[in-house]
Image (cartoon, rainbow, N blue to C red):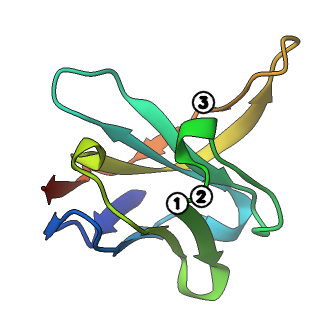
Amino acid sequence: QAQVVESGGDSVQAGESLRLSCTTSGLNFDRFTMGWFRQAPGKEREDVSCISRSGNKTYYPDSMKGRFTVSRDNAKNTMYLDINGLRPEDTAIYYCAADGMFAYYNDGRIACEDFKYWGHGTQVTVSS
């Protein structure tokens, strides 16, 4: 049975850093594009980042560039999200997802889409 499990969420002060991890089981991890998403209270889910199977291609929405870094270790079936300079507005549940795609639109927009396997999320709370 396929499982996706996030870890590393915590309650921190603004300016601190966190590393979130995502591990999978029952999946061919190194065959899948992986993604991070987040959902803040009262808001829609948004893309944080996605990373190709080999890790040589990544995508970040403009709002996530600079403070968020995605990486993966296929030998450990694990993906990471490093977040630096945390802000109160980063408070959200962070979700990991497996087996998705980079979507390219005619208007130049890129998105992380069609992910099939999702974790239950890990809570990140940032206080000022």
Q: SS for tag 3?
A: loop
Q: Residue 126 got which mark? A: none
Residue 24, x across and y down, in percent: 45, 68
Identify the image quadrant of the N terminus: bottom left
Give, as a three-letter code, the residue at label 2: Gly
Give, as a three-letter code, the residue at label 3: Asp
Q: Which residue is mark 1?
A: 68
Task: Answer with left or right where residue 23 lies relative to residue 92.
Answer: right
Residues at circles 2 and 1 in contact by the CB criterion of under 8 Å:
yes
Q: CA distance from mark 3 to mark 2?
A: 25 Å
Residues at circles 3 and 2 in contact by the CB criterion of under 8 Å:
no
> Residue 122 versus residue 59: which sits nearer the camera?
59
Residue 66, x across and y down, in percent: 59, 58
Q: Can I make out residue 1 in this image?
A: no
The quadrant in which residue 42 appears is top left
Q: SS for tag 2?
A: loop
Nearer to us: label 3 or label 1: 1
Q: Which residue is mark 2?
A: 66
> Residue 26 versus residue 80: which sits nearer the camera?
80
The numbered mark, 3 or 2, whose residue comes first in the sequence reads 2
Q: How packed is label 3: few (under 14 Cα within 10 Å), some, or many (20 or more)?
A: few
Q: Which residue is mark 3?
A: 114
